[in-house]
Amino acid sequence: MNDTVETKAYPALPSTPEHVGIIMDGNGRWAKQRGLPRLAGHRAGVENLRRILRAAVELDVPILTLFAFSTENWKRPSREVQGLLRLLAESLNKEVDELHENGVQLRHIGKLDPLSDTLKKNIREAVELTRHNDRLIANIAFNYGGRREIVECIRTLIQQGIPAEEVTEEVISEHLYTAGLPDPDLIIRTSGEMRVSNFLIWQGAYAEYYVSSVYWPDFDKDEFYKALEAFNGRQRRFGGLPAQSATEA
Ligand code: IPE
Ligand code: IPE
Ligand code: MG
């Protein structure tokens, strides 16, 4: 994470989101544009993830949740799915020590069940190794689906015998994969698609959305900063009224 020299200034913004979610989309189109196989796009996407983790630290974003593989992505051709699993295994082996040295706390959200025993073990070890780091929380959503997450939460509540009247929004939040983390303030989607594709559907209820037309492998620190600037221009109301109008009534 320390391998580039900072050249450009990024003035501090009045407010920085505490938690940013990113739907890292567009790897396939990035590759197609270059006449490359889709997997080359995914490889470039992983490279970019390293850059964005570094940029998050530099731009003072403390929590990132990164959508890497959805519960629906198993529908893709097995070659691509296998390639993505291989890339995950490879990057864990290659990057974990450096991420640890740089104070990154790695977490995983989603279901590990269908992954191989080795991959599951490597993910658990990476999470365990980095659990006390506090420079950046990087939450990797792999085999993640928002609906699946809610179904699991409901099952857990029923199994625990929680009475219906005790089921509140707080109780649900505490039983999601993101328990203990604040809801995302900002959700970025790259590659121009205007949909959530099952990402943080509960937690994102009041997130600000930002869509960049840039494909994920090209989404660099400049683009990230633009998203943070746009976030600063938003007026968050959470269903209420802006401070001034509230007093006018
Ligand atoms: C995002 O890129 C990565 C995953 C969903 C695994 P895509 O693979 O969806 O790229 P496009 O949308 O086809 O360009
Ligand atoms: C969402 O992208 C999932 C990830 C980025 C991991 P997709 O490419 O799978 O979403 P759709 O199919 O365009 O909605
Ligand atoms: Mg896509």
Image (tube, rainbow, N blue to C red):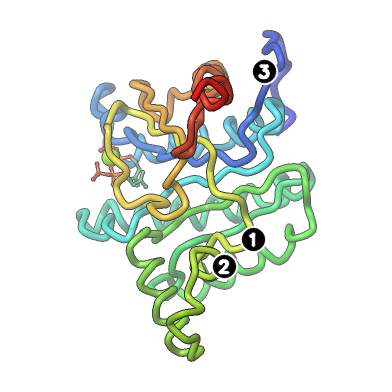
Disc 3 designates what residue? 13
Residue at 55% from the left image edge and 49% from the top image edge: 183
Q: In this picture, is 189 found above or below 229? A: below
Residue at 50% from the left image edge and 86% from the top image edge: 162
The crowd level at tag 1 (other Cα within 10 Å; few <14, some 14-19, many 20+) is few
Task: Report the amino acid beneath label 1.
Answer: Gly
Q: Nearer the viewer, residue 78 or 13?
A: 13
The numbered disc on residue 174 is 2
Task: Report the amino acid beneath label 3.
Answer: Leu
Q: Secondary structure at mark 3?
A: loop
Q: Position of residue 115 (x, y in %)?
A: 42, 70
Distance from Cα at disc 3 to Cα at disc 2: 31 Å
Circles 1 and 2, Cβ within 8 Å, touching? The answer is: yes
Q: Position of residue 32 (x, y in %)?
A: 24, 28
Q: Secondary structure at mark 1?
A: loop
Distance from Cα at disc 1 to Cα at disc 2: 7 Å
The numbered disc on residue 180 is 1
The crowd level at tag 2 (other Cα within 10 Å; few <14, some 14-19, many 20+) is some
